[in-house]
Image (cartoon, rainbow, N blue to C red):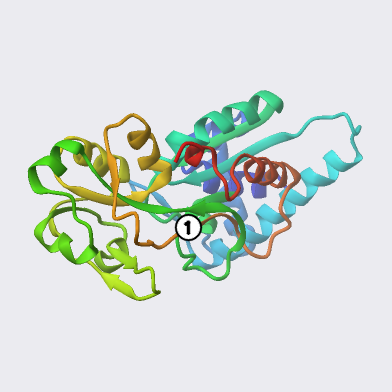
């Protein structure tokens, strides 16, 4: 069992050193245990390079089963414990950068205060995390769910609005129709398509695709909001970023007569695994904090 725990810790912590710190043993002990497990199974589980550790196909399949077994054991221990016993154990959560900073940090801090025996590892990054290969328990995803194998629960809705600063609008005029954006400067979120970001629906149900002149591209919506507030151009983005700028008067919403796509905010977990009780508790907690009438839209 110690060898299996070592492999799972390496996958979830990312390095032998971090796994050793997690289990309270030396890096050399972790390395030896993983090697012993590979010898016992007769198969290489990890490809070791100077920069990173990558699971082999066999390692990925074994890790999924091993992590599930350890999670089941941990849950069994907690189930037979006193009902007053708190949640404990490690949680690994991935979430988009801007959303995580603005709307998850406070919630997660409160969750940790409620459950002092929980250890949280939070990865804030706009890239798509591979939960299984990178050892995450769950991830918050905004937008279309491309991996249909993941187990998803909808937490709320992300709505899109189009905004610009008053200074920009005074210089360039206020567009009254999406077609007028061809004469305006756009700020593009590079993690979504041009057509998707600048898509509008007319009051009679027709779909339009605007074509602003893109001056800036970024893979972070907060950077685009700052540029828009500085008068660089027009941005179309989620209310969980732009609502604060509008409330502060730094951005003004435009094209309000035209609808824009909304997307789901989901939490996803790896397939084929019984979700540990601590993960279920965090999912329920986040669902209660978000919902389809999120706090960031209270004043819109």
Mark 1 neighbour density, 10 Å: few (under 14) some (14–19) many (20 or more): few
Q: Residue at x 29, y 55 (%)?
A: 255
Residue appearing at x 14%, y 36% in the figure: 167
How many marks the image carries: the answer is 1
243 left or right of 67?
left
**Which residue is more in the foreground, 84 or 33?**
84
Q: Position of residue 190 (x, y in %)?
A: 25, 56
**Residue labelled with disc 1:** 130
Question: Where 107 falls versus 164 (above or below)?
Answer: above
Quick check: can you spot residue 222? Answer: yes
| Residue plotted at (32% across, 66% down) | 200
Q: Who is closer to the viewer here, 270 or 159?
A: 159
Q: Position of residue 194 (x, y in %)?
A: 24, 65
Classify residue 80 by image quadrant.
top right
Residue at image coords 90%, 34%: 83
Position of residue 254 in the picture relative to residue 150 (left or right): left
Q: Hey, which quadrant is residue 59 in on the image?
A: bottom right
Whether residue 116 is visible here, answered yes or no, is no
**Mark 1 element type:** loop
């Amino acid at each position: 069992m110690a060898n299996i725990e070592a492999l799972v810790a390496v996958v979830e912590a990312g390095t032998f050193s971090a796994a050793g710190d997690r289990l309270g043993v030396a890096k050399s002990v972790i390395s030896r245990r993983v090697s012993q497990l590979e010898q016992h199974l007769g198969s290489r589980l990890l490809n070791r390079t100077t920069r990173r550790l990558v699971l082999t196909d066999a390692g990925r399949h074994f890790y999924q089963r091993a992590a599930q077994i350890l999670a089941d054991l941990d849950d069994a221990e907690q189930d037979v414990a006193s009902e007053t016993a708190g949640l404990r154990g490690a949680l690994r959560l991935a979430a988009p950068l801007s959303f995580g900073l603005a709307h998850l940090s406070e919630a997660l801090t409160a969750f940790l205060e409620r459950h002092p025996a929980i250890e949280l590892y939070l990865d804030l990054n706009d890239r798509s995390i591979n939960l299984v290969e990178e050892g995450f328990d769950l991830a918050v995803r905004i937008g279309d769910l491309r991996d249909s194998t993941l187990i998803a629960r909808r937490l709320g809705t992300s709505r899109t609005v189009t905004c610009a600063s008053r200074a920009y609008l005074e210089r360039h005029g206020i567009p009254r129709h999406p077609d007028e954006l061809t004469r305006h400067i756009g700020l593009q979120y590079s993690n979504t398509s041009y057509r998707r970001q600048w898509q509008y629906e007319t009051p009679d149900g027709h779909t339009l695709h605007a074509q602003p002149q893109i001056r800036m591209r970024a893979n972070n919506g907060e950077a685009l909001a700052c540029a828009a507030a500085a008068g660089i151009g027009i941005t179309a983005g989620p209310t969980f970023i732009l609502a604060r700028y509008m409330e502060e008067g730094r951005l003004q919403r435009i094209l309000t007569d035209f609808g824009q796509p909304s997307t789901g905010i989901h939490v996803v977990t790896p397939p084929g695994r019984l979700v540990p009780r601590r993960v279920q508790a965090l999912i329920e907690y986040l669902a209660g904090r978000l919902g389809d009438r999120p706090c960031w839209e209270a004043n819109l």
